[in-house]
Image (spheres, rainbow, N blue to C red):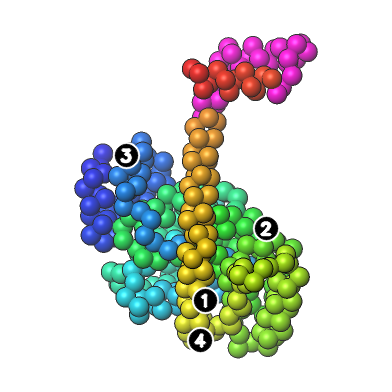
């Protein structure tokens, strides 16, 4: 068993091995997880969490790497959580993102971690919120969460980040695809990457038109900007960082940032509570109480909703 307080202290000093061990405890749902989260709680809240999402092939990893470079030039410590599809063989993460971001591997001010989704819908690993908390407590100023491109379910990134960046690329039918996937509703900043390709201007215009068709905005409301980049050459990256900083300042001024973080914490508590309840119900599968309720339903003496109420009541009281 690891000494959690020692691991947390080492993570605060920026030791990557300690950060890695803490995230592994999170991913493995370790019995020490409660102790880890309790130790981290007073140390969190300082990091700015940016989510990056978009279809496969738009250059998310290249954009993420370019943003890391830009933030490091400003002297900020950066954490990267790259949520990969699960390997069909090991259940672990495919490490393509880490290979593409290898230029930052030797930088002590950058921490990169790949996490497997393990079949979790929404493009995010179930442990991602806790992993973000580890990076936050470890002193990262900015945390970039890059999600696997899975279309409609990617909207979950909006509930996990302070600012959501939606990436598109010309020639991929991305404008229409974005509307179908519903990600036009969750983007705070839109980036048209690979803007040196034919059709980049048309993609930006189409996107601007679609955003204009959305819900009416008041004079002080945030209007998502559209930034054109060629991330592989570092073009447009500073403009992207500027757009992110403007959004952060707007959120802080309007109280939106605090509200988003409260909502995020509430969802996390709900997820933990529901998971715990599911585990307790699972433990009852061979229990006489559940069997007795099932028999009463089959006999017509009880409906499933009242049975569920009785079950939950028994679990919470017991």
Mark closer to the observer (3, 2): 3
Q: Residue at x 46, y 51 (%)?
A: 129
Report if the CB atoms under discs 3 and 4 are less than 8 Å apart.
no
Disc 4 marks which residue? 235
Disc 2 marks which residue? 152
Disc 1 marks which residue? 243
* Left or right relative to 11: residue 304: right
Q: Could you say where residue 251 lies in the image, as x and y percent from the top left? A: 51, 64
Work out how far the residue at label 3 is from the one at label 2, CA to CA, in angstroms: 35 Å
Q: 82 above or below 69?
A: above
When asked about the image quadrant of residue 36, the answer is top left
Badge 1 element: helix
Q: Could you say where residue 267 lies in the image, as x and y percent from the top left? A: 53, 45
Badge 4 element: loop
Mark closer to the observer (2, 1): 1
Disc 3 marks which residue? 35
* Left or right relative to 16: residue 200: right
Decide which of tag 3 and tag 2 comes sooner along the chain. 3
What's drawn in magenta, residue-wise?
Answer: 279-305
Q: Label 4 crowding class (10 Å Cα cut-off): few <14, some 14-19, many 20+? A: some
């Amino acid at each position: 068993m690891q000494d959690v307080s020692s691991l947390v202290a080492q993570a605060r000093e920026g030791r990557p091995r300690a950060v890695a061990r803490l995230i592994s405890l999170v991913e493995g749902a370790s019995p020490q997880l409660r102790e880890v989260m309790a130790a981290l709680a007073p140390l969190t809240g300082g990091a700015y969490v940016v989510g990056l999402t978009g279809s496969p092939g738009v250059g998310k990893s290249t954009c993420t790497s370019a943003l890391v470079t830009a933030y490091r030039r400003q002297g900020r410590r950066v954490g990267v959580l790259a949520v990969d599809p699960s390997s069909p063989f090991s259940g672990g993460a495919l490490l393509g993102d880490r290979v593409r971001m290898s230029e930052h591997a030797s930088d002590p001010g950058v921490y990169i971690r790949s996490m497997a989704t393990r079949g979790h819908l929404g493009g995010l690993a179930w442990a991602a919120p806790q992993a973000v908390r580890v990076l936050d407590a470890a002193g990262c100023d900015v945390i970039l969460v890059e999600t696997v491109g899975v279309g409609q379910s990617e909207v979950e990134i909006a509930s996990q980040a302070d600012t959501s960046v939606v990436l598109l690329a010309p020639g991929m039918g991305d404008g229409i695809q974005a509307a179908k996937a519903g990600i036009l509703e969750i983007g705070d900043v839109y980036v048209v990457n690979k803007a040196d390709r034919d059709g980049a201007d048309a993609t930006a215009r189409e996107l601007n038109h679609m955003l204009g068709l959305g819900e009416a905005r008041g004079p002080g409301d945030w209007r998502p900007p559209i930034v054109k980049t060629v991330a592989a050459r570092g073009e447009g990256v500073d403009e992207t960082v500027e757009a992110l900083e403007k959004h952060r300042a707007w959120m802080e001024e309007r109280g939106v940032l605090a509200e988003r973080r409260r909502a995020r914490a509430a969802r996390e508590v709900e997820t933990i509570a529901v998971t715990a309840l599911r585990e307790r119900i699972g433990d009852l599968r061979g229990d006489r109480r559940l069997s007795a309720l099932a028999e009463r339903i089959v006999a017509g003496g009880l409906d499933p909703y009242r049975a569920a109420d009785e079950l939950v009541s028994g679990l919470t009281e017991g």
